[in-house]
Amino acid sequence: MKTENTDLCELDDLVIPKCLLEAAEITGNCDLEIQCVPGAIIITASDVLDGIPAPLMALFHDLEISDATIRSVLMEGGIQNE
């Protein structure tokens, strides 16, 4: 993307250098959660399970559905038959 003569505030994409993600031990294939606080921008790896309501997670656990399976369904749209 060419940024010459472009106001950086008008750009739609946030580009985080791979070396920074590696230094923070964030894998390149995960979703990111970005929080803006006075004087700082906090970027962390996001876990899709954080968005599931507690009662629903309790039901999944009662049904002995693993977190990995739940994550797979949410991220990939389903689990693959092996």
Image (spheres, rainbow, N blue to C red):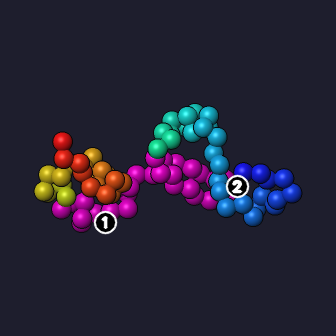
State the image coordinates of residue 72 (x, y, percent, origin top left): 30, 50
Q: Check disc 1 and give the amino acid type.
A: Pro
State the image coordinates of residue 71 (x, y, percent, origin top left): 31, 52
- Horizontal side, residue 9 vs residue 72: left or right: right
Based on the displayed image, in which of its 4 quarters is residue 50 positioned?
bottom left
- Give the vertical position of 2 relative to 9 (above or below): above
**Quadrant (top left/top right/bottom left/bottom right) for the C terminus:** top left
The residue located at (62%, 34%) in the rendering is 19
Which residue occupies the foreground of this view, 75 or 24?
75
Label 1: how many Cα within 10 Å (few below 14, some 14–19, many 20+): few
Tell me if residue 47 can be seen: yes
- Give the vertical position of 68 relative to 23 (above or below): below
Q: CA distance from mark 1 to mark 2?
A: 31 Å
Disc on res. 39: 2
Label 2: how many Cα within 10 Å (few below 14, some 14–19, many 20+): few
Based on the displayed image, in which of its 4 quarters is residue 36 positioned?
bottom right
- Horizontal side, residue 47 vs residue 21: left or right: left
The residue located at (75%, 64%) in the rendering is 10
User: In the image, which residues are magenta?
Assistant: 30-59
- Asked if the stretch drawn in magenta spans residue 33, the answer is yes
Tell me if residue 67 can be seen: no
Q: Which residue is mark 1?
A: 53
- Asked if the stretch drawn in magenta spans residue 68, the answer is no
Q: Check disc 2 and give the amino acid type.
A: Gly
